Amino acid sequence: MALYAAYGSNLDPRQMLLRAPHSPHRGTGWLTGWRLTFGGEELGWEGALATIAEAPTEALFVSLYDLTLDDEQALDAWEGLEIGLYRKVRMRVQTLDGEEIAWLYVLNGWEGGLPSARYLGILADAAEAAGAPSDYVAALRSRPCRSLGL
C-alpha cells in the first residue's frame, strides 16, 4: 500500500470511495510550508486546476488514504497522470500521530489563472466533507474565481 494525500476534490470521502473503493481512509493532516493554488488554465476545460506551491508560512489540509496498487492505478487515470496532466511527488505530512511520508499529485503547468466558481465550490465542499476547519473552508469559498456564464 502507498500513502496518498488528497488536497483537492479527492478530499471528498464519497468521491474517493468511487475512485479508490479498496483503499481505507487513514486520517487527515497538514502539508506545512505549502499552499493550494491554481494553474494550467489552458489545460482545464473550465479554468485553472488545483495544484500546490511552496509557502513557508502556510499549510495545506490533506486527507490520507492507504491506496492499493489497483486503486492507485485507477486514481492515476482519473488525475491524468498518463497524459502528463499531473505528476506524483512525495511530501512530509504532519498528523496528530507525527510525520508521515505521502505522495500527492502536482500539476504539470504554470501557476496562475482562476478556477471556475463551480470547481472552487467542489473543492470547498470536499474540504468540508473531509472535516477541514471552518476557517479553511471559508477561505476556499472566498477565493477569487471566474464565472463560466455569460
Image: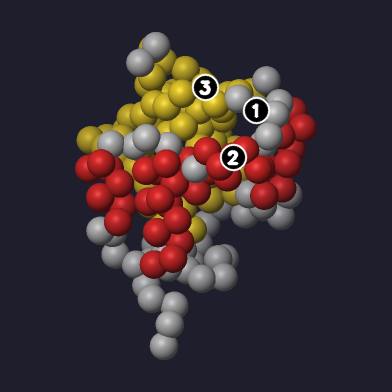
Residue 60 image offset from top left, x and y in percent: 35, 37
Tell me the kind of residue under disc 2. Answer: Met
Q: Which mark is residue 44?
A: none
Q: 134 or 143: which is nearer to us?
A: 134
Q: Secondary structure at mark 1?
A: loop
Labels 1 & 2 near each other (Cβ < 8 A): yes
Q: Report the side of 142 relative to 131 (left or right).
A: left
Residue 123 image offset from top left, x and y in percent: 43, 52
- Residue at the far right: name it: 70
Q: Which mark is residue 23?
A: 1
Residue bearing the label numbered 2: 16
Q: Report the side of 42 relative to 57 (left or right).
A: right
The Cα atoms of the two marked residues, 1 and 3, are separated by: 9 Å
To which quarter of the image does residue 98 belong?
top left
Tell me the kind of residue under disc 1. Answer: Ser
Residue bearing the label numbered 3: 26
Color encoding of the figure: secondary structure
The Cα atoms of the two marked residues, 1 and 2, are separated by: 8 Å
Q: Secondary structure at mark 2?
A: helix
Q: How many C-alpha atoms fall within 10 Å of the one at disc 3: few (<14), some, or many (≥20)?
A: some
To which quarter of the image does residue 97 belong?
top left
Picture layout, residue 115 above or below residue 129: below
- Res. 52 visible in picture: no
Q: Quadrant of the N terminus?
A: top right
Tell me the kind of residue under disc 3. Answer: Arg
The Cα atoms of the two marked residues, 2 and 3, are separated by: 12 Å
Q: 131 or 77: which is nearer to us?
A: 131
Q: How many C-alpha atoms fall within 10 Å of the one at disc 1: few (<14), some, or many (≥20)?
A: many
Picture layout, residue 56 above or below residue 128: above
- Res. 22 visible in picture: yes
